[in-house]
Image (tube, helix red, strand yellow):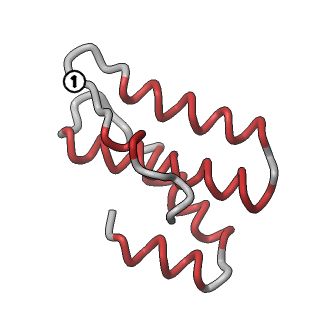
Amino acid sequence: MPPLASSDFNNGGRKDTAMLCFTIIGNRFDKSMTIKAKEECVDAFMKLWAIYYYDFYDYPKCFDCLIQAQEITQDKHQVIVKCFKQPAYSI
């Protein structure tokens, strides 16, 4: 996911558009994806988490985003850890 996309949406105050884009990216997850593509899916869910947490205070949705990101990292063959080490609030 290009870094420009998230900064454009968030700096422009278009959180709803950012949420739609991150949802589309995250929901494209498939177990046969490359590690890079899986990282992008996890990153999208983490950015969704940040928007729900800091802008909408929708904690059930926050939890859903974390669960979806965790499920991607629980792939039996590959584990993605670096996306969880990045601060999600820096979108």
Q: Is residue 49 left or right of residue 31?
A: right
- Write down the quadrant of residue 34 in the picture: top left
Amino acid tagged 1: Gln
The single residue placed furthest to the right in the displayed view is 57
**Of 1 and 59, the residue lying toward us:** 59
Residue drawn where x is 51% and y is 46% of the image = 45
Q: Is residue 86 above or below residue 78?
A: below
Q: Is residue 77 left or right of residue 53?
A: left
Q: Is residue 44 left or right of residue 89?
A: left
Residue 63 in the image, given as x and y percentages of width and height? 67, 33
- State the quadrant of the N terminus: bottom left
| Helix, strand or loop status at disc 1 | loop
Residue drawn where x is 47% and y is 71% of the image = 6
Q: Is residue 44 above or below residue 17?
A: above
Residue 39 in the image, given as x and y percentages of width and height? 31, 44
Residue drawn where x is 45% and y is 24% of the image = 71
Q: Which residue is mark 1?
A: 78
How many numbered callouts?
1
Residue 86 in the image, given as x and y percentages of width and height? 41, 49
Q: Is residue 32 above or below residue 75?
A: below
Residue 20 in the image, given as x and y percentages of width and height? 59, 61
**Of 35 and 87, the residue lying toward us:** 87
Q: Is residue 3 left or right of residue 11?
A: left
**Badge 1: residue crowd in 10 Å (few <14, some 14–19, many ≥20):** few
Residue drawn where x is 20% and y is 17% of the image = 77
The single residue placed furthest to the bottom in the displayed view is 12
